[in-house]
Amino acid sequence: MAIAELKKDYLYELVEGGKRADGRKFDEYRKISLEKNLIANAEGSARVGLGNTDVLVGIKLELGEPYPDAPEKGVLTTSAELVPIASPAFESGPPSPEAIELARVVDRGIRESESINLAKLCITPKEKVWIVFVDIHVLDYDGNLFDASALAAIAALTTTRVPADRFGLGEPFNLPLEHFPISCTSIKLGEAIMLDPCLDEERAASARITVVLDENNNICATQKGLKGSFTQEEVNKILEISKRRSNEVRKLIK
């Protein structure tokens, strides 16, 4: 969705003066709210508010077959819904490229950080494993869906119980989580690097990058967006900001 030139000019003027429209510092997140265990029929759930962006994630577990190339591991699958009630930019119907990208970025952060010990979700090698479904529902879109969705997903996973009793496989148990990845998205607006862009900033930006880090500051995944580029110096700055801010955000989920 395009942004009006007048509003875009206003944002660039603010940046040149070292300011953002909502008064935040360039390396500052909007207010974050986090609620857990909101969906009675889910194995885990969480809702994250990031400014006016609002995301609900539900976790379900079912039995199924492992992938042929990982016969002794459970399966992770992530999907996202971008529906018109969340934004006039979204349309009903099959998943849009934006929804597919959102799901892939969240999935990659969980998968590459090895957050879930999938080996502990194997019941019978080559035959039966637990499949973890991460379902992302965007309720309100005001920018930076990557970070809001990733935070809601990992928070929901911390609440998840594996329903072994429902399938006659013993007592339910906590999902085996070992790492806690946090996603940090920055944009380039003019010469400025800004963390956690709101929707207008996101639309006016020339480049966007998402960095996912675990609790040891290991980079688990990155995703570059928009047509512009970052210099090496800007990337180094983004990594420094992301490490610092991710450690602050991670405290919210424990």
Image: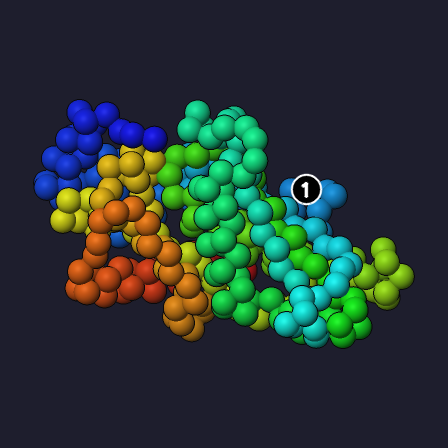
Along the viewing direction, whichever of 105 and 153 lies nearer the viewer: 105
Location of the N terminus (image quadrant)? top left
Relative to 88, say whether 60 is above or below: below
Residue at 17% from the left image edge and 64% from the top image edge: 233
Up/down of 137 relative to 123, above or below: above
Give the quadrant of the C terminus: bottom right
In the image shown, does 251 or 85 lie closer to the viewer?
A: 85
Question: What's under tag 1, amino acid-wise?
Answer: Ile
Apparent side of residue 148 relative to residue 61 in the rendered image (left or right) = left
Q: Position of residue 129 (x, y in %)?
A: 75, 66
**Residue at image x 86%, y 58%?**
167
Q: Does residue 251 appear anywhere in the picture? A: no
- Along the viewing direction, whichever of 254 and 102 lies nearer the viewer: 102
Q: Position of residue 125 (x, y in %)?
A: 76, 74
Residue at point 19% right, 27% down?
5
Badge 1: how crowded within 10 Å, few (<14), some, or many (20+)? some
Residue identifier under label 1: 39
Across and down, in percent, residue 215 comes to 45, 69
Location of residue 150 with respect to 97 vertically, above or below = below
Above/below status of 31 relative to 27: above
- Mark 1 falls on what kind of element? loop
Measured as percent of width and height from the top left, residue 157 is found at 61, 57
